[in-house]
Amino acid sequence: MQKKLVIIFIFLISLPITYVSFISYRSSFSLVQSSTTAAANQMTDNAMDKVDRYIADLKRYTILPLYNKDVQKYLDQRGADWDKRTTIDIFLLYLNNTKEEILSAYLVDRYDAVFFSRKPGINALYPETRLEGWKQLARKYGTAPALVGTHPIRVNENETRQVFTVIRSVQSTSSLKDIGIIAIDVDTRLFEGIINPLNAVTHGDAFIVDEYGKVVYNSNPAKLGEDLSQRLLLGKAAKPRGSFQLEMDGKPYIAVYTVSEQTGWKTLVYMPITELLAPMKQNRNALIITTLSIISFALMVAILLSYALTKPLKRTVQLMKQVQRGNLDVWVNVKYNDEIGMLGSHFNRMVRRVRDLLDEVHETEKSKQQADMLALQNQINPHFIYNTLESIRMLAELNDDDQVAELTYLLGQLLRYSITRSADESVTVGQEIEHVRNYLFLLQIRFPDKFAFRLDIPDHLYSLPITKLVFQPIVENAVFHGLEKRDGTGTITIKGWTDRSDVLFAIHDDGVGMTGERLLSLNHSLRDGKADKFGIGLRNVYERIKLHYGPSSLLTVNSKPGLGTTVTLKITGLLGVDASRK
């Protein structure tokens, strides 16, 4: 009991504390996760907004040739004289210096002559290798600007730079025909100032991906231009903005993304959840230490309380063991008037009562021994009765009186069945039926042609064990209270059947029956134990089957005037008893 009390105290204290600590930790984690996700979403929105504004400026720059009449004229002119070169170079130089990140600007005239301006440090460009791609994009997008994601360009003999390009066809303001192409190359290092702060805050890895799933920018140069369209990372980024969880290389991540409405580019950052949990480790460790401290204190208190509560019980148990060994000279010292004190008081009364009962038993045994000696002196040997009946039967046979001989034989069988077996001895159903047959044969000598006997019992029930003298008292009632008062020959039927582990027997006679009032009185007397003269035998049978087979066993009587009476016996578990004996 002391161990149980300790366990109960620990559970009552540790479980709520552990649960509260766990919920607190989970709430903090959810709060940190949601706040970090929201902050990352805001940062990706800001980053994408900066990129959108920058590219919007570039797209506006590509419209500038429409407002420069000289550029319009020279783009529609074949050849490249000094005036044409000077005018276009000045325009491209101005365009190239509008933003620091622009590496080079190009103009292509109507006759595919390419003019360009480059930043210092770039010694050579090879626009002719890219001209055909520009023309295809210009035709595809018409008057709208085309945005080409990150790709390498040669800037020197052995050097390349990663750039993204804005391209637009140039139309004549007078004829509205295409007279050239403008292209602007922008160094992707532009994104460093936008993406690196995002990585620093989120402790993650950010990407800018174009509408085709190719990497426009990542802090790892090796990933520039990589195709992520088939990756799980992009597969879940289907909405304009949002977040989701994923697992890469066995580690959990939270991904946050924003899609630009202008360019279709995505800014996406995925953050390791372990990094999110890092600020919470200190809080988690404090919770663990606090929880363990409270549980340890609770364990000490539980041990002390359980010892104080169980000490009187242990003393009582020790005294009970002494009583079990036969020592009745024990006594519990009751100090408190609580449940344990009441237990000690009842124990003291019980021991005192046991001593009194032992004294009474001792005196009763003395009286019983004296009564047994007197009964032995006055006992008639049953064998003397059997031998006497056998002698009468033999004399009747010698005198050719078969009826007296048969009567004497049947009476001897009935006496042998009733006397030689104790009241609680079990017999088989077959033996009970044979006893009923002998009894009815004896009655038929007294009441010739008064009744017939019919059995409807399955063969497998004959071997079942049953307490003796169950059917005979019921059959006796049927003869003397049912069939004797009937005109003509009646029939007594005994039917047996099974219901799961229960066995039921119905003893039916087609005698005079009884009124409803008489039937109600009889059943009531069977239940309350106050059987009248007519119900003594039935009450005796009912009590014995309840004693042998449990209170769920039943004896019920059904009868109607002129239609006979049926007594039904339900013996619970009889099949189970038989199976266990076998």
Image (cartoon, helix red, strand yellow):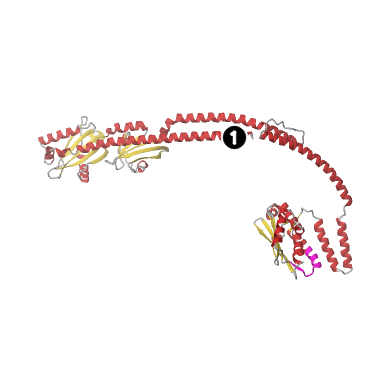
Which residue is denoted by mark 1 in the rendering?
A: 7
Please state if 450 lies on the left or on the right of 379 as rendered: left
As rendered, which of 61 and 178 lies closer to the eye?
A: 61
Q: Position of residue 144 (x, y in %)?
A: 21, 43
Q: Relative to 80, does residue 374 appear above or below in the rendering?
A: below
Kindly indicate the quadrant of the structure image that contains residue 296: top right
Q: From which residue to which does the magenta span run? A: 439-454
User: 438 and 448: which one is in front?
Assistant: 448
Callout 1: SS: helix
The reply to whether residue 452 is visible in this rendering is yes
Characterize the local packing of mark 1: few (<14), some (14-19) or many (20 or more) Cα atoms within 10 angstroms: some
Residue 452 lies within the magenta run: yes
Q: Is residue 554 above or below residue 286?
A: below
- Position of the C terminus by quadrant: bottom right
Specify the quadrant that holds the N terminus: top right
From the viewer's perspective, tell me whether residue 326 is left or right of residue 207: right
Rendering coords of residue 290 (x, y %): 51, 29
Magenta segment: does it hold 176?
no
Q: Is residue 118 left or right of residue 549?
A: left
Horizontal side of residue 75 vs 48, given as left or right: left
Name the amino acid, label 1. Ile
Q: Residue at x 73, y 59 (%)?
A: 429
- Residue 175, relative to residue 105: is it above or below? below
Q: How many marks?
A: 1
Q: Residue furthest front?
A: 517
Residue 303 vertical placement versus 385 (above, below): above
